[in-house]
């Protein structure tokens, strides 16, 4: 009898060990232990619908250790009063920002934040799993009225065109900034946020790895000839984005050599002259090129060559408006010659039978 009992006890112990081993392998997190507190906490007073400043306080953070949690709580204190939980339900990842689809982020917008207030607002965040709450995160502390929209300087690119598809964005260092927040989205109405990063340095080149990414970043390169808004904010030691600036840029088309014309024009006959200088101010190399026009629904292109063996061509009159006010019957595009020597002036002529927007460019 005693042997049977010992055998049964031994079997139970072995089974318990096997179960424990399987459990620890499949689920390394003990559901009974509190989760790790959130990390990468930041507060930025941003109106998410218009992406303008100042706005309601938007709080952002990252999962503390990557383990699964049920959600998060946000606590607020004003002027060092006791912390009070300000969310109703547990916070989980949700879409925020303009446009659609909205990027899924760990975020919370405090509608009780008063951006003109001189009081001190302090926030902390906890993670919750199986009704066990983590320790509080680092705190976000700020005086809303001290938020500065003018401090950031030296933004580059700053309202520029022909920016590479993998742009390098730079700004002047802010003395009290420990990190920087970079946000980017298309200028087109309804475009969602495409980049939201937390950076240690005052520069970022698209594609560079970063430690803290609040939302999925864009592809390795941007689309061609697309205008983007971008914002950079200086995040201080209290995890508050205390200063901010914004600008725009437009990406280039890698095949675009020079921009000759982009304007709304009356009907008539016109002439443009190109001095073989590219969009960056450099003399172009010999090779094959084309001039392309877009005017309303009309598009056309003409090919030509710049060659060291070509005979030099005299450009003649380079006045823009020609034809004595005669309105042509149809759209037309023509060039003076199909071959040019290096340094020659390339003459481009076009006809507009009606008022229209006109774009004329040189391409490789």
Image (cartoon, helix red, strand yellow):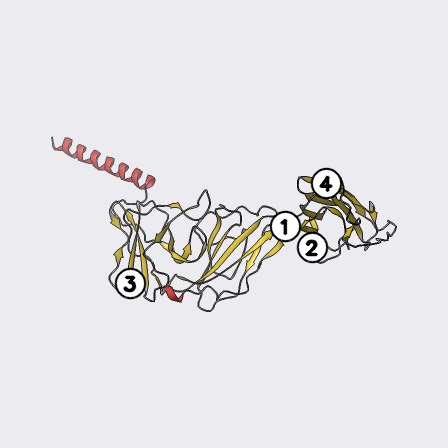
As measured in the structure, the alpha-carbon distance from the residue carrying label 4 to the one carrying label 1 is 20 Å
Give the side of residue 86 with respect to residue 150, left or right.
Answer: left
For label 2, count other residues whose C-alpha is less than 10 Å away and answer few (under 14), some (14-19) or many (20+).
some
The residue sitting at 71% across, 58% down in the picture is 281
Please say if the residues under marks 3 and 2 sit with CB atoms less than 8 Å apart.
Answer: no
Q: Is residue 289 visible?
A: no
* Label whose residue precedes the other's in the sequence (3 or 2): 3
**Does the residue at mark 4 contact the one at mark 1 (Cβ under 8 Å)?**
no
Q: Is residue 186 left or right of residue 127?
A: right
Q: Quadrant of the N terminus?
A: top left
| Earlier-in-chain disc, 1 versus 2 | 1
What residue is pinned by disc 2?
279
Name the element at disc 3: strand
Nearer to us of marks 4 and 1 is 4
Residue 252 got which mark?
1
From the image, tell me which residue sits under label 4. Answer: 300
Q: Nearer the viewer, residue 352 or 226?
A: 352
| Label 4 element class | strand
The reply to whether callout 3 and callout 1 are in contact (CB within 8 Å) is no
Camera-nearest residue between 229 and 298: 298
* Secondary structure beneath label 2: loop
**Distance from label 4 to label 3 (Cα)?**
64 Å
SS for dot 1: loop
CB under 8 Å between discs 1 and 2: yes
Counting residues from the start of the chain, the first of labels 3 and 1 encountered is: 3
Dot 4 or dot 1, earlier in sequence:
1
Q: Disc 4 vs disc 2: Cβ atoms closer than 8 Å? A: no
Few, some or many C-alpha atoms within 10 Å of disc 1 (few <14, some 14-19, many ≥20)? many
> Percent position (x, y) of residue 158?
57, 59
Q: Residue at x 75, y 56 (%)?
A: 283
Q: CA distance from mark 3 to mark 1?
A: 48 Å
């Amino acid at each position: 009898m005693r042997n049977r009992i010992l055998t049964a006890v031994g079997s139970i112990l072995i089974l318990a060990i096997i179960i424990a081993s399987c459990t620890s392998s499949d689920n390394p997190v003990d559901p009974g232990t509190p989760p790790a507190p959130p990390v990468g906490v930041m507060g930025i007073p941003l109106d998410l619908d218009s992406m303008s400043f100042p706005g309601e306080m938007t709080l952002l953070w990252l999962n503390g250790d990557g383990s699964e949690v049920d959600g998060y709580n946000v606590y607020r204190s004003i002027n060092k009063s006791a912390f009070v939980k300000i969310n109703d339900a547990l916070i989980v990842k949700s879409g925020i920002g303009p446009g659609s689809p909205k990027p899924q982020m760990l975020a919370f917008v405090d509608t009780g934040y008063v951006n003109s207030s001189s009081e001190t607002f302090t926030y902390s965040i906890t993670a919750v799993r199986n009704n066990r709450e983590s320790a509080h995160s680092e705190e976000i502390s700020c005086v809303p009225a001290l938020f500065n929209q003018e401090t950031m300087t030296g933004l580059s690119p700053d309202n520029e065109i022909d920016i590479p598809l993998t742009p390098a964005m730079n700004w002047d260092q802010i003395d009290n900034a420990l990190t920087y927040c970079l946000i980017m989205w298309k200028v087109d109405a309804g475009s969602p946020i495409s980049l939201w990063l937390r950076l240690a340095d005052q520069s970022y080149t698209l594609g560079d790895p970063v430690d803290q990414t609040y939302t999925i970043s864009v592809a390795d390169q941007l689309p061609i000839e697309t205008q983007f808004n971008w914002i950079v904010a200086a995040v201080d030691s209290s995890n508050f984005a205390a200063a901010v600036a914004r600008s725009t840029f437009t990406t280039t088309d890698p095949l675009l050599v020079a921009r000759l014309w982009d304007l709304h024009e009356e009907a008539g006959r016109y002439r443009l002259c190109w001095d073989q200088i590219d969009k960056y101010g450099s003399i172009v190399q010999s090779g094959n090129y084309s001039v392309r026009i877009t005017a309303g629904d009309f598009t056309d292109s003409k090919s030509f060559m710049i060659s060291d063996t070509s005979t030099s061509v005299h450009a003649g009159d380079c006045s823009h408006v020609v034809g004595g006010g005669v309105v042509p019957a149809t759209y037309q595009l023509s060039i003076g010659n199909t071959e040019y020597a290096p340094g020659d002036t390339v003459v481009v002529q076009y006809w507009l039978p009606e008022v229209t927007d006109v774009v004329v460019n040189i391409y490789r």
